[in-house]
Image (spheres, helix red, strand yellow):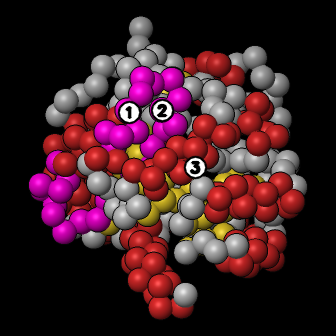
Amino acid sequence: MPRDLKRPDQRHPEKAHRPATPRLPKPDWIRVKARAGKGFRETQEIVQTHGLTTVCQEAGCPNLGECWDKRHATMMIMGEICTRGCTFCNVATGRPEALDIFEPGRVADAVARLGLNHVVVTSVDRDDLDDGGAEHFAMTIRAIRKRAPGTTIEVLTPDFLKCRSKALERVVAARPDVFNHNLETVPRLYAQVRPGARYFHSLRLLQRVRELDPAIFTKSGLMVGLGESAGEVRQVMDDMRAADVDFLTIGQYLQPTPRHHAVDRFVTPEEFDAYARAACGKGFLMVSATPLTRSSHHAGEDFAKLRAARSARPAQA
């Protein structure tokens, strides 16, 4: 009998043993209005008719209504089942199906139909594949370049931790405009929040992208409200800058179900402003730090600003 991924117990079987913790009531600054206008319906139709998966839906993003209303959707390739079981993530965990070789073409066609100036392509972790899905990422980038040559491309990749060598090189060789890999949290919390990953491996991945192709912008993100301290967040900023990361995003963690990692607290807008000021002072080209910031939120507008910031920097040196 097939799994029903709409049921939390079948979507997250690895969390069945975890004690349920009640979700804290959201403060006013974290609430969003539901939207279902013409743009939303058109985006939904294109996603459905192309048989695509979006991280907007799978991760339960609070900005889904806003982005889809603007015909912006973040494509999630390689299926809807992840081989990892991070305690913060709402993407289903288990044994994925085989890769769909026609998926890159369908993604590219959807990008063209949506008329996207900038697209974000992410994926589940595929530790079952020798290259972690690196070639599938490269195929998707090439397909978008062919079908929608005016669209800039941002990839949000897994860490390729368990892959054979040269997996990262395949993605970089396809030349995305932005390479994003989220560190997610501070090193102390990795065992609780991101148990299948390694902090310094992820940091080195970002640094390696810059070494392979300095023209590619690098980007990484953090969630706050998981139990980290402000000092730990600032140390991660320093680590990212040492790896020459261009763009930092910081957003509030929201607990998907009672069996996911609990929200320690809701970080105030004033604290987010302080993080943004600190990050700008450390030399990031771009910083987005608000309660509702997510990796792909306003990615197109942010890419234009990022490119302008890099062009302006030599003149200020």
Give the residue at mark 1.
Answer: 167
Q: Position of residue 158 (x, y in %)?
A: 49, 38
> Tag 3: residue type?
Asn
Distance of label 1 from label 2 (alpha carbons): 7 Å
Q: Does 260 appear in magenta? A: no
Q: Does 164 appear in magenta? A: yes
- Residue 314 vertical placement versus 87 (above, below): below
Q: Neighbour class for label 2 at 10 Å: few (<14), some, many (≥20)? A: many
Q: Position of residue 110 (x, y in %)?
A: 21, 53
Q: Nearer the viewer, mark 1 or mark 3?
A: 1
Q: Quadrant of the N terminus?
A: top left
- Residue 240 vertical placement versus 197 (above, below): below
Give the residue at mark 2.
Answer: 160
> Which stretch is magenta?
143-171
Residue under the point 76% across and 47% down? 186
> Tag 1: residue type?
Ala
